[in-house]
Image (cartoon, coloured by chain):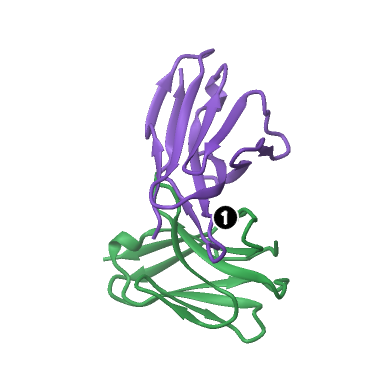
């Protein structure tokens, strides 16, 4: 599975949109981009995933560049409860495991 | 989304004893489950992959005789830490993959804190 690069930390003001970037320049055609988050002392929570089209659900939006070499997770109105480590993971094939990097620590400030 | 439940959420055991952690998929059948370990301030590290009805596949450096994994049904996998030592104290997390052709998402349990004293 392709490697991802994320900034180690970001801050965001409460109520504002949080935009979390992820680089995956070696992604191949059949690999999906997944986003999970982990709130302290809990198991990771699935947020969203996509292949090449932009995706939106009740939690977030995922914007994937046309060349698929990077993506951005958008939390439209961040709340204090969104403070967590966010992991961007590239995964190929439905049977494969998720390999976690170090993620981005997002801190939402009041 | 789908629900994966782990039990117990916290356990303390004496050094040298064994402890079992259960992982259940509550509303879907999971043909594949994964076990991770996470030390403080570190990311999740995959320990093993278990497929229902077959032997688990362990990652390099993980002792299969120490961390026994059983995946006897489509909704239950167990991790048994045998002869636990204080260095086994960690946060253990399971995850499960939906077994449908379109099931391409992996869901995680709440995690289990193990403290070996």
From the image, state the color of chain B: purple
Q: Is residue A29 left or right of residue A70?
A: right
Place of residue A108 in the rendered image (x, y in percent of width and height, measured from the top left) = 34, 65
Residue, x 39% and y 52% (percent of image)? B27
Furthest-bottom residue in view? A66
**Residue B43 appears in the figure:** no
Q: Please, what secondary structure does the residue beneath circle 1 have?
A: loop
Place of residue A78 in the rendered image (x, y in percent of width and height, measured from the top left) = 32, 70
Instruction: Specify the quadrant that holds the N terminus of chain B.
Output: bottom left
Place of residue A68 in the rendered image (x, y in percent of width and height, measured from the top left) = 64, 80
Report the number of discs.
Answer: 1
Asked which quadrant contains residue A47, the reply is: bottom left
Quick check: B110 above or below A67?
Answer: above
Write down which chain is painted green. Answer: A
Pick whichever, A77 or B48, lies toward us: B48
Residue, x 31% and y 65% (percent of image)? A109
Pick whichever, B14 or B67, lies toward us: B67
Quick check: B17 above or below A83?
Answer: above
Residue, x 45% and y 29% (percent of image)? B114
Quick check: A68 above or below A4?
Answer: below
**Residue A91 appears in the figure:** yes
Callout 1: chain: A
Place of residue A72 in the rendered image (x, y in percent of width and height, measured from the top left) = 51, 76
Residue occupied by mark 1: A102
Pick whichever, A63 or A16, lies toward us: A63
């Amino acid at each position: 599975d392709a490697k991802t690069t994320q900034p180690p930390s970001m801050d965001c003001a409460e109520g504002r949109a949080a935009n979390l970037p992820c680089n995956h320049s070696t992604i191949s055609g059949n690999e999906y981009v997944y986003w999970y988050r982990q709130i302290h002392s809990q198991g990771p929570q699935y947020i969203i995933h996509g292949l090449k089209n932009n995706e939106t659900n009740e939690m977030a939006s995922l914007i994937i560049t046309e060349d698929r070499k990077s993506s951005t997770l958008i939390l439209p109105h961040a709340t204090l409860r969104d403070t967590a480590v966010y992991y961007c993971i590239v995964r190929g094939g439905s049977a494969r495991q998720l390999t976690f990097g170090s993620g981005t620590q997002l801190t939402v400030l009041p | 989304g789908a629900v994966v439940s782990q039990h117990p959420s916290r356990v303390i055991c004496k050094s040298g004893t064994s402890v079992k952690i259960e992982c259940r998929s509550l509303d879907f059948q999971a043909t594949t489950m994964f076990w991770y370990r996470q030390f403080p301030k570190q990311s999740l590290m995959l320990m093993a992959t278990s497929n229902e009805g077959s032997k688990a596949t362990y990652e390099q450096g993980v002792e299969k005789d120490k961390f026994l994994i059983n995946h006897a049904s489509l909704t239950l996998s167990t991790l048994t830490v045998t002869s636990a030592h204080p260095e086994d104290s960690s946060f253990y997390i399971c995850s499960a993959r939906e077994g449908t052709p379109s099931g391409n998402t992996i869901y995680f349990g709440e995690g289990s804190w193990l403290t070996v004293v």
